[in-house]
Amino acid sequence: MSTRKNAAYNVAYRMFSVFLPLVTAPYLSRTVGTEGVGLYSKAWSISYIFVLIGMLGLNDYGVRAIARVREDRQELDRTFSSIWQMQLIVAGITLLFWFGYVFLVAGEEKLIAFHLTMMSVSCLCSFDWCLMGLDLFRPVALRNTFVKCAAAACVFLFVKSGKDIWIYGFVWSLATLLGNLSCSLSLRGRVSYHRVPLAESLTHLKPCAVLFISVMAVNIYRTMDKVMVSVIAGVDENGLYENAEKVIYCLSGFISAIGTVMMPKVANMWKKGQMEAIARHIDRSMDLVICMVSAMTFGVAAVGDRFGALFYGEAFRYSGILMIPLAFTLIMIGFANVIRTQVVLPQNRDSIFVKSVCCGAVVNLIANAALIPVMKSMGAVVGTLLAELTVPVVQYVILRKELPYRRYIRYVGIYAMIGGIMLVAVRGIGAALGQESWLNLGIQAACGAAIYGVLCLIWWKVSHQGLFRKQ
């Protein structure tokens, strides 16, 4: 399947993974309030930490390992079998610790946490890493779309008050498990399990653990923020932060989708020594990603304050304020993601990934500890901004002599300038329209998209980039 089709399917998959909870968010916010949203966010954040431990970095390592052997069926079966055996061991042990947390440690979020158990169970049968390594993005997208649509419908049917917040957790937890089970059906006939020696399975443990360090470091400033806000500033503040972060996380799914599609492709190209083709892929990906994230960043900054109150309700107006600075993390995430998925991981240079995100995690923890007591949820936003900026900066320090960073940074400057013009225009249109309404917000969004699109077309025509790039 072509890269474009894979990207389209993976964008759909990523979007439905995070977009459908966003669709239910306005209903949930009005039904359970800031306290309910904050309490669920705390329970889910802790549950997600256990999921990450259960997967132990496989979402990166597994894709890369399968991509390299997918043309040799015998080697493919052996690699799949040994990785899955390791996955069963790690995920099984993690599940036991999760039960220990639920029954011995969890506080007011215990009921919600218990009904999130299937999140950890799903780690036993998560084969996305194999499907994506085989370039099979279509079954993942279609099957997960169906399951998650059904889950969203159940939320509207069964969550009726603040006491039903556990149902919300149960529905999405079950959807995750059913999605993984349904996707596993797509492996039939393409890969087979054969028992391999335990020692062979454990050889994957060390490289997975190295990537896991990075995954956990990222999780510190993506998920632990919510736990820290809950503990230090209260669950109400965390509810505001959760809804602001949810929108940004949804938008960042586009970035992850492109990176996930490109990584197995570039890993296979590295193996074949196609260096010139790799350089072209990286350059085009950086151009595309920075163009895309700049539009999202400045678009959210232009309408975030109005969007928060309209989308979540007046009680969550401050969530819209939090979205504005938080949106600028998208540029940093996009830049770092291209380098990670198309340079660092395909070359087995995992230590660069580890160093960059660990530095980001340290910066985030220090900033959170200093700022959350004073600024509450806005302190977590500032900490996240500093952490996300640290990651590409560390990558630059290490790789500056190998990559044309000046060209990449030029992309950031150009699209940020275009985005800035759009932001000023959209804010001006909003001031002229006055009253906050969905109609006026739609007019602002449409005008912003038109302005950004026209300016990009002019730039691409003049510079022979984008749609006018010479092959």
Image: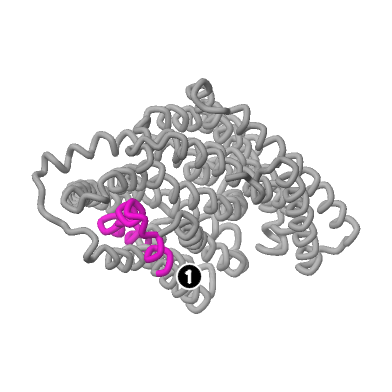
Q: Mark 1 points at which residue?
A: 164
Closer-to-camera residue (162/217): 217
Residue at horizontal 32 percent and vertical 68 percent from the top: 182
Q: Give left or right: position of 38 versus 200.
A: right
The residue nearer to you, when weighing 341 against 329, is: 341
Q: Where is residue 361 in the image (x, y as percent from the top left)?
A: 48, 32
Question: Could you tell me if residue 93 is visible in this image?
Answer: no
Residue for point 37% across, 28% down: 351
Number of labels in the image equals 1
Residue 118 on the magenta span = yes
Whether residue 316 is situated above or below residue 372 in the rendered picture: below
- Residue located farthest toward the right when viewing the structure as drawn: 432
The answer to whether 381 is drawn above or below residue 44 in the figure is above
Q: Residues within 10 Å of mark 1 (few under 14, many from 20)?
A: some
Note whether 26 is above or below 280 in the view shown: below
The secondary structure that most of the magenta stretch takes on is: helix
Residue at 60% x, 55% y: name it. Answer: 247
Q: Where is residue 131 in the image (x, y as percent from the top left)?
A: 32, 57
Is residue 82 toward the left or the right of residue 268 in the image?
A: left
Question: Is residue 29 visible from the viewing direction of this image?
Answer: yes
Over which residues does the magenta segment extend? 115-142
**Position above or below: 218 against 153:** above
Q: What residue type is labelled 1?
A: Asp
Residue for point 23% across, 38% down: 205
Q: What element carries label 1?
A: helix
Q: Which residue lies furthest to the bottom in this view?
A: 157
